[in-house]
Amino acid sequence: MSVIEGVTRDLLEKTEFLTIVTEGADGPHVVGNWGDYLRRLGLDGDRIVLPAGYYRKTEENLQRNARVQVLAASRAVQGSHGPGQGCLLHGAGALVSEGELADRVKTAFPWARGALVIEVERVELQL
């Protein structure tokens, strides 16, 4: 059974921005990515693929600890208490610079040095 389904899938198809959090030796590290980049590459089951430009600290953190959290939200999705829904995705991530996924990302985004690949394991709805 997929964890990215229903409201979560709808939200990811409408979100404008994603916040990505990794854990480093000096604490949490936060980067972002655009929702339309996610949509251009498509959702692949429970895997999110995003273009990675610099993301040097993110890559370093993921090499030490693959745990990652992604926060997404959209006012275009009905929430529990009114307009607006969010979700927190928990999973494992890696920055991939070679292979099919990296090639697909580099074709769509020539400025990218690779793909940030996140295997989503659990979702928490917010709002």
Image (spheres, helix red, strand yellow):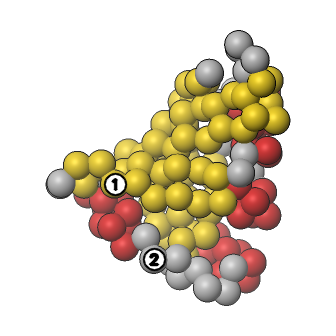
Image quarter in which the C terminus is found: top right
Q: Is residue 79 above or below residue 57?
A: above
Residue position marked by numbered label 2 in the rendering: 54
Q: Residues within 10 Å of mark 2 (few under 14, many from 20)?
A: few
Kind of residue sitting beneath label 2: Tyr
- Answer with left or right where residue 36 lies relative to residue 121: right
- Say what secondary structure mark 2 lies in: loop
Q: Is residue 104 above or below residue 93?
A: below
Residue position marked by numbered label 1 in the rendering: 29
Q: Is residue 20 above or below residue 124?
A: below
Q: Residues within 10 Å of mark 1 (few under 14, many from 20)?
A: some
Residue farthest along the top direction in this orientation: 81
Q: Residue at x 40, y 54 (%)?
A: 30
- Say what secondary structure mark 1 lies in: strand
Q: Residue at x 79, y 64 (%)?
A: 40
Q: Residue at x 36, y 51 (%)?
A: 22
Instruction: Inspect this view and state whether residue 7 appears.
Output: no
Residue farthest along the left direction in this orientation: 25
Q: Residue at x 59, y 60 (%)?
A: 33
Nearer the N terminus, badge 2 or badge 1? 1
Name the one closer to the observer, 80 or 54.
80
Cα–Cα gap, marks 2 and 1: 14 Å
Residue 109, image quadrant: bottom right
Image quarter in which the N terminus is found: top right
**Where does residue 31 sit, x and y in percent of width and height?**
46, 59
Kind of residue sitting beneath label 1: His
Q: Is residue 55 above or below residue 66?
A: below
**Where does residue 42 sit, x and y in percent of width and height?**
77, 57
- Answer with left or right where residue 113 lies relative to residue 40: left
Residue 83, image quadrant: top right
